[in-house]
Image (cartoon, coloured by chain):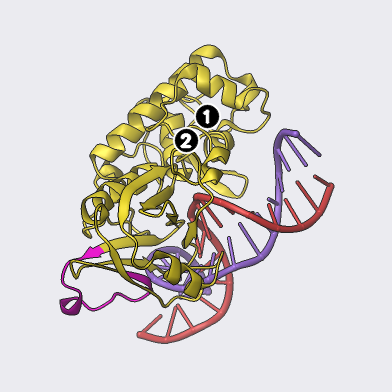
Chain colours: A yellow, B purple, C red
Amino acid sequence: MPELPEVETVRRGLDGVLVGRTITGLEVTGRRSVRRQRPGELVERVVGRRVVLVERRGKYLALVLDDDQVLVIHLRMSGQLLSVKDPHARPRAPHTHVVMGLEDGSEVRFVDARTFGEWFVTDDVRDDGLPSFFDQLGPDPLVDGLTAPVLRERIAGKRTAIKVALTDQHVVAGIGNLYADEICYAARVLPTRRCDTLDEEEIRRIAAAARRILREAIVLRGSSLRDARYRDLMGDLGGYQTRHRAYGRAGEGCRRCGGTIERLEIGARSAYCCRGCQH
DNA sequence: AGCATCACCTGGCTGC
DNA sequence: TGCAGCCAGGTGATGC
């Protein structure tokens, strides 16, 4: 499940293969991957355009085109982008739903088994050339930074669990179920703690943990889990899964206090934590 | 308005 | 061994 570190890794890959190149073809074969507009409209508006910039906010990828439109891609649960240099030599993987052809003969393929991911093009952009709906997102910890005062202001007065707030893209952009657990664990705060019960020191620890963990996960090119099959643009696995301290470790020992990692449910989502050292 | 819950979707795993 | 049924979760809609 791609979150900020995985999407940022893919963005860096796309930056190398797309910027300055012209999109020579776009084939939409999946029925659900393009749903905000007719697939034919997307193809017509995008083909022939040159990519001038590849940006990211939270889990959204934004390909800024030379006519000021933006091609937006969200991977959601299982979406994968793959760069293929020699398309005829490599058969398309099952669940390939969109194929973008480039002027150098290479392709970028969108593979998405669960079909939650989506592509759409918009010309509703801000002064900085990025989609206007990005205004609805909270600060991106990597792009905008996430200081303790900013986090305090974003969660002020909230009665929800801190984990619910951290994974709410309107509060902070880019954190999903996995990194929220890792951040709460590193901050020694239970994911179930109500936002309005957190003191200054705890908020400071959460903000610091978010910055550190997301940065470290990007260095290791994201997390590839056993079931989900996240790979980067070149098809390589990430390496951060070996650093997980909470997520997916129910019943295993806590590496900090020797307690046991528990699996809880918060709003029908799993949450992993240690009651021994998170409070 | 703010918060909780549900629908969407299917590969892979569990258990009988 | 085969297969039914469950689980995973980001986002937007719906309900309270």
In this picture, which residue range is highlighted in magenta? A83-100
Q: Nearer the viewer, residue A130 or A75?
A: A130
Residue A47 vertical placement versus A172 (above, below): below
Name the amino acid, label 2.
Cys
Tell whether position A52 is magenta.
no
- Callouts 2 and 1 close, C-beta under 8 Å: yes
Look at mark 1 in the image and give the residue it sits on: A190
Look at mark 2 in the image and give the residue it sits on: A273
Residue A146 vertical placement versus A44 (above, below): above
Q: Same chain for the residues at labels 2 and 1, yes or no?
A: yes
Tell whether position A96 is magenta.
yes
Q: Nearer the viewer, residue A88 or A167?
A: A88
State the image quarter where residue A5 is shown: top left
> In this view of the protein, can residue A25 be seen by the observer?
yes
The tag earlier along the polypeptide, 2 or 1, is: 1
Q: Give x and y (percent) for residue A135.
A: 55, 38
